[in-house]
Every structure is written in structure tokens, then in C-alpha cells.
Amino acid sequence: MSVVAGEAQILNICIDPEMQGQGLGRRLLRHLIAEAGRQSADTIFLEVRISNQAAFSLYESSGFNEIGQRRGYYPAKDGREDALVLALAL
Ligand SMILES: CC(C)(COP(=O)(O)OP(=O)(O)OC[C@H]1O[C@@H](n2cnc3c(N)ncnc32)[C@H](O)[C@@H]1OP(=O)(O)O)[C@@H](O)C(=O)NCCC(=O)NCCS
């Protein structure tokens, strides 16, 4: 995560596949949200692949809202994949 001029950007969240589904992703996200607040950010932004249901569900249930899309943002098997842009107001 980077925090610049009151805006935090979560760049990557990753849990070891063998450790997924045990609440660690939610704990890590909670930690990042608290850290962004400590660094005086007022908004957190992130991008997620449209197909990444697990991550989207984590973010949505943590209060993030979809504020836009970026067409062809990610490389994908058959070309490119769109990103959803999500934001959380702190
Ligand atoms: C997304 C990721 C970080 C979640 O971490 P995790 O430790 O598995 O998630 P948790 O066990 O904390 O679960 C938190 C929430 O994520 C969602 N979730 C997790 N696994 C899911 C699955 N297989 N299907 C649907 N939703 C899922 C649920 O909303 C879950 O909440 P719930 O347990 O109350 O239902 C993890 O799957 C991961 O590292 N994925 C690969 C990398 C990645 O895609 N990172 C995000 C890039 S934007």
C-alpha cells in the first residue's frame, strides 16, 4: 500500500494458497485500513479483476464501493481483462 497526499492505494494483497479461507485476508485488509487511517488518508483505492469474485467479495463486505472500471487493465489468458476500481472513505 502507498499513501500519498491523503489517498491510500492498495497495490497488492496476497495470501499463500495453502492458507486461504481462514480469515487471514480479512485480517490483512483490516490492518491496511487501520494503517491508512494512521497515515491520515481519507480514502483508500484499489483495483480488482472483474473475475476475482473472492477478492471482490472481501472488499465489498469490508465497505468498499465500486466507483469505476478500467478497460483492459490486466493481462489475461485470451487478451486483456477489465478492472473494477473500488474506494473506501475513511
Ligand atoms: C483475495 C484473498 C486475499 C482473500 O484472502 P483469504 O485469506 O482467502 O480470505 P478470508 O479467509 O479472510 O475471507 C475473507 C472474505 O473473502 C471472501 N472469500 C474468500 N475466499 C472466497 C472464495 N473462495 N469464494 C468467494 N469469496 C471468498 C469472502 O467474502 C470472505 O468472507 P467470509 O469468510 O465472511 O465469507 C486471497 O484469496 C488471495 O490471496 N487471492 C489471490 C491474490 C488476489 O487475488 N489478491 C487480490 C488482488 S485485488
Image (cartoon, rainbow, N blue to C red):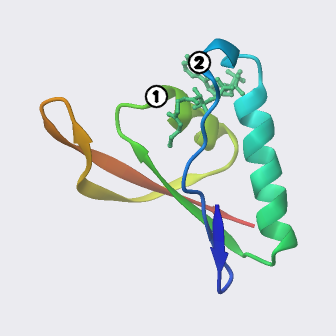
Q: Write down the quadrant of residue 51 in the picture.
A: top left
Using a 10 Å C-alpha cutoff, classify the residue at mark 2 as few (fewer than 14 neighbours), some (14 to 19) or many (20 or more).
few
* In-image side of 10 versus 76 (left or right): right
Which residue sits at x=59%, y=42%? 60
**Residue that carries the numbered disc 1 in the rendered image:** 53
Regarding ligand 1, which quadrant of the image does it lie in? top right
**SS for tag 1?**
helix
Please state the horizontal and vertical placement of residue 83, each as a whole percent of the image.
34, 49
Q: How many marks?
A: 2
**SS for tag 2?**
helix
**Residue that carries the numbered disc 2 in the rendered image:** 17
Please state the horizontal and vertical placement of residue 31, each as a whole percent of the image.
82, 49
Examine the rendered structure and indicate whether residue 32 appears above or below residue 13.
below
Examine the rendered structure and indicate whether residue 26 appears above or below residue 29.
above
Hey, what amino acid is under mark 2?
Answer: Pro
Mark 1 vs mark 2, CA separation in Å: 15 Å
Q: Write down the quadrant of residue 27 in the picture.
A: top right
Query: Disc 2, ligand 1: is the CB inside 8 Å?
Result: yes
Hey, what amino acid is under mark 1?
Answer: Gln
Q: Earlier in the sequence, mark 1 or mark 2?
A: 2
* In-image side of 9 versus 78 (left or right): right
